[in-house]
Image: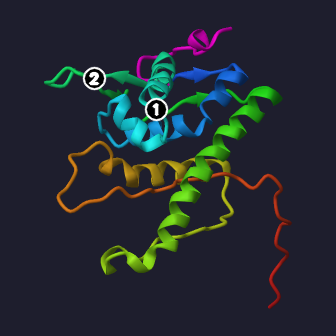
Amino acid sequence: MSESHDQKRSPQDAPPRFENPRSIRALAHPARMAIIDALATGEELTATQCAELTGLSPSATAYHLKLLGRHGLVETASPRPDRRERPWRSVGRHIRADLDTSTPARASATAAVAAAYMDTTRAIGVAFVEAGHDEPEEWRDAALNNADLWLTAEEFHQVAGELAAVIAPYRRRTRPVGSRLVRVMNVVVPHRRARPEPGPRQA
């Protein structure tokens, strides 16, 4: 099945679903990750502006935008007054894709997307910490938090939903004066190998 016909649409608001392992892996391309991240903030950007983010030529970036558009992840926006180049935007509140992990090949491809996603965030975090001494005092502290929690399956989904709810009001709003782009990474995932059950406490 070709890339442009790989997705399956369910209800109108559902994210595009990818089942072809090659198409899933295509999302892990660093340039496409950068474009998805940039448009997820609510900005409308042209291929030339996206090229500045990816380090590629505008023509190469236009190819990546069109591929993402074929999958329903981005769409063209209204032309700007000069009509020289049409901008692109995300398709909803935030860009999301439903990646099928029902077979080993699809799961492996999805793992590559997850790794690229986390590597991108890691690079942003490391770059900030390394240059932290140059930041204004009010921006100097990065919030780095991990927590291993014993959760039931119901609590696992509840925690993920609660974290998403905290971030939701800040998505796609008008950019406040004095704000800057801040990466917030939200990962809720069970350990693949469960730790031993704790023994009874000694009195």
Can residue 93 be seen from the camera position used here? no
Labels 2 and 1: the sequence-earlier one: 1
Number of other residues with Cα within 10 Å of mark 1, as a class: few under 14, some 14 to 19, many 20 or more: few
In the shown orientation, is residue 187 left or right of residue 56? right
Q: Residue at x 46, y 32 (%)?
A: 57
Q: Main secondary structure of the magenta part?
A: loop
Identified by mark 1, the residue type is Ser
The residue identified by callout 1 is: 57
Pick the quarter of the image with the N terminus: top right
Residue 188: x and y, percent? 60, 53
Q: Secondary structure at mark 2?
A: loop
Question: As rendered, which of 58 and 183 lies closer to the eye?
Answer: 58
Q: Secondary structure at mark 1?
A: loop
In the shown orientation, is residue 103 left or right of residue 183? right
In the shown orientation, is residue 73 left or right of residue 7? left
Residue 23: x and y, percent? 65, 22
Can residue 131 be seen from the camera position used here? yes
- Asked if residue 3 lies in the magenta stretch, the reply is yes
Q: Quadrant of residue 152?
A: bottom right
The residue identified by callout 2 is: 85
